[in-house]
Amino acid sequence: MSNFRELLTNARAQINEVEPAALQAKWDSEWVLLDVREPEEAAQGTIPGSILLPRGNLELQVETVIPDKATPILVYCTAGVRSCFAALTLGQLGYTNVTSLSGGFEAWKDQGGTWQVPKRLDDTQRRRYHRHLLLPEVGEEGQRRLLDSRVLLLGAGGLGSPIALYLAAAGVGTLGILDMDEVDLSNLQRQIIHTTDSVGMRKVDSARATVRALNPDVNVATYDVHLDTTNTASIIAEYDLVVDGTDNFATRYVINDAAIHANIPVVHGSIYRFEGQVTVFAPPQGPCYRCFQPTPPPIEFAPSCSQAGVFGVLPGIIGSLQATEVLKLLLGIGETLVGRLLTYDALTQTLNTYRLKRDPQCPSCGTQSTNLSDQHTIQAV
Ligand SMILES: [Zn+2]
C-alpha cells in the first residue's frame, strides 16, 4: 500500500518539473500558466496571465479551458506538490507538453518572479454581483473573470435581446454587438432590448443604450456592418467567444470558419415558429457548424421569422439558454452543450438533447482542413 510520499515520488518520476530560477532563463511566451490553487489562495497573489482552475475541478473542466492538448502548459500551486499531481493527471488526459513549477508560487515569489495581487471588486460591484458571489462556482474570482471577458454577440434581435441583457446583468465586461438593421415596430413583439421609443433607431445604438443603462460596468463596442470574409477575422480576433443570434445561413458559415481559425467557441441558437435549438460549436471537442449543417437548406425550407412567424416568447427562452452556455464557458463550470444539441418545443414544453458528432471529412474542422485554415480561407456560402 502506497503512502503519500511514494505517490508523490511516483508522480515526480512521470512528469517534467522546472525550478523558478531555470524557468526565467528559458521563458516560453507560448506557455499557458495554469494555477491549480483554490480561489482564496489565488486572491493573495498570482503570476500575471494565469488561468485559475482549482485541482478539484481539473479533470472536469480543463478540456473546455484548454482544448488543444499540444498546448505547452506550466502548472503551479503554492509549494509545487498539487501541481505534480495535476501534471500527472493532465498527462493521463492526453496533454503532451506539461511542466510543473517546482516549489510553486512561493518559490517563484522568493526568487524574484513577477507576481500581482488580482484586482478586487469594489463595494458597488460586491453589491451588484452579490448573488453570484454567494455561489462557490462563481465567487469573486469568477466574477472578476466575467468582468475581464469579451463576448461578441451577432444580432441585436429576438435572440440577441435576452443574450445581451443577461450577459450585461452578469457583468461580462466587454460586449461587442453586431447588427446592421434598424428597429421596426414589428420587432417589439419579441426583441425586448428595444422599446417603442427606439423604433427607427439603429439596433446597435438602441441595444447599447439599454445595456449601458442596465450595467455601466459593461463596455459596449458596436458593429453596424455586414459580416463577410473581409472583416470577420479581424472583428473576431478581439473576443474570447462568439454568440450567434443571427438568422442567416451564409453568416453562420463565415463565422464558423473564422472562429475555428481563431480557436474560440461559438454558442449557436436558432428558432422557428414554436421550436428552437441551442448548441456550442468548439472543435475539436465537438463538431463545428459545417459538421452539423454541411450545406445551407434550400431557401424554401428555410424561411425567416418575417416569413414564417415566431412565437414572441420563444427567442427569450432560446436566447437565455445561449446566455447560460456563454457564462458557463467563461467561468469554466458545468457541462456545456459542446457536442450536444438541445431542442425545445414551446407547444408541448419539451426539451431534448441529442449527441452531435464531428465529421472527420469536414472541410472546416476535419483532419483534411489544415490547409484551409492555414491559408485564412473563409468560404462564404
Ligand atoms: Zn466541422
Image (cartoon, grey):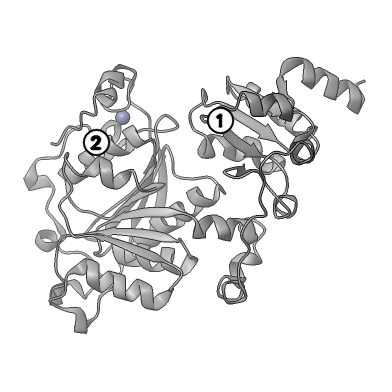
The x and y percentages for residue 174 are 40, 59
* Residue 148 sits above or below residue 61 on the image: below
- Which quarter holds ligand 1? top left
Q: Identify the image quadrant of residue 254.
A: top left
Q: Is residue 343 visible?
A: yes
Name the amino acid type tagged 1: Trp
**Residue in the picture at 71% in, 39% down:** 55
Name the amino acid type tagged 2: Gln
**Residue in the picture at 41% in, 53% down:** 150
Residue tagged 2:
293
Find the residue positioned furthest to the bottom: 197
In terms of sequence position, does the residue under pointer 2 or pointer 1 come before the other? 1
Q: Secondary structure at mark 2?
A: loop
Alpha carbon distance from label 2 to label 1: 35 Å
**Residue in the picture at 27% in, 47% down:** 235
The x and y percentages for residue 188 are 21, 75
Q: Is residue 288 left or right of residue 335?
A: left
* Residue 326 sits above or below residue 23 on the image: below
